Image (tube, rainbow, N blue to C red):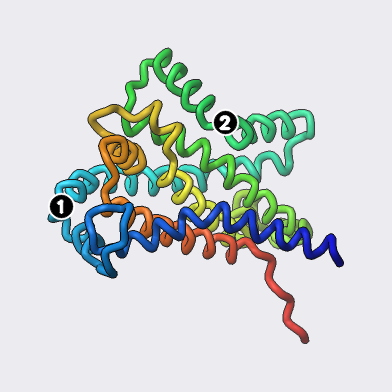
Amino acid sequence: MRRSRFLTAAGVVTLVFLYAPVLVLAVFSFNGGKYTASWEGFSLHWYEQLIEGTDRTARSLAEPLRLSLRLALAASGVAVVLAALTAVGTRGAPRWLAWPLLALWSLPILLPDIVLGVSWAGAFHLLGIAPGFWSLLLAHATICAAFGLVVVRARLASLDPTLLEAARDLGATRAGATWHVVVPHLMPALIATALLGFTISFDDFMVTFFLAPATEPTLPVRVYGTVTRGASPILNALATLSLLGTFVVAFVALRLVRPGTPRPE
């Protein structure tokens, strides 16, 4: 009993330590004053400034926001295709081939972001790929596909092989059976991969910092540059909206990949 209470208390303290700064940031996004260190009353002023774009800081965030959205959409789309093809391909491949490929796909998850950023920057320089949208897309799509592959393979493992055999017995080709049996079964995982990939790409900073040109920063890189010149309450509002959107997307993705509860007959 004492051990259980100790673990519960330790868990609560850990959660408070991790999320208290986020809560303070969200609260001060409704601060009416222009300083982030003192509370001067409740107000939606900074949200209005952010949405209307009347403030200089808000205007400077508009183009990086559009770039981050385009990059996240493209990276998540490519990640869905890569994760699906890799999961289906390695399922029927011999172990001596499948395991090394899966190990390589796991590297973006295991390696620190700073190592990935430096490695990709050097590799793209040797390949003659200039820093910009396409280098960011290649890097982000690889990271998103690595995480998505875990989701897709978990869903694919629950597919009954007899369904594919039945489709082939009824005259379907291998490609037809994959399209009509495997793809519908994987659809929740593919949607979850797209949502998770979008959030990963949209929020990425470290890898993007090494690959984005100074003239075309993404939203996280622009926010970093703005913070180094002095904090603005508008950034609190932006961070709160970004966190809220990330939580919503992650919640939907987790709901999609959660095993369904069987209904009583």
Inspect this view and state whether residue 169 appears: no
Give the foreground label among 2 and 1. Answer: 1
Determine whether 107 is above or below 92 in the image.
above
Q: Nearer the viewer, residue 91 or 263?
A: 263
Q: Front-most of 38 and 182?
A: 38
To which quarter of the image does residue 188 belong?
bottom right
Residue 231 relative to residue 177: left or right: left
Task: Indicate the position of residue 228 as horizontal and vertical percent values.
Answer: 31, 35
Q: Is residue 262 at least partly visible in the picture?
A: yes
3D distance between C-alphas at marks 2 and 1: 36 Å
Quarter assignment of residue 109: top right
Outermost residue, bottom side: 265
Q: Secondary structure at mark 2?
A: loop
Identify whether 151 is placed above or below 187: above
Residue highlighted by disc 1 = 55
SS at mark 1 in the image: loop
Near mark 1 (Cα within 10 A), the count class, few <14, some 14-19 or many ≥20, is some
The residue positioned farthest toward the left in the image shown: 54
Q: Quick one: quadrant of the N terminus?
A: bottom right
The mark total stands at: 2
Which residue matches tag 2?
Answer: 112
Relative depth, front residue between 9 and 168: 9
Query: Where does residue 5 sit, x and y in percent of width and height?
Result: 78, 65
Q: What residue is shown at x 46% (from left), y 60% (from top)?
A: 23
> Which residue is located at x 36 percent, y 42 percent?
220
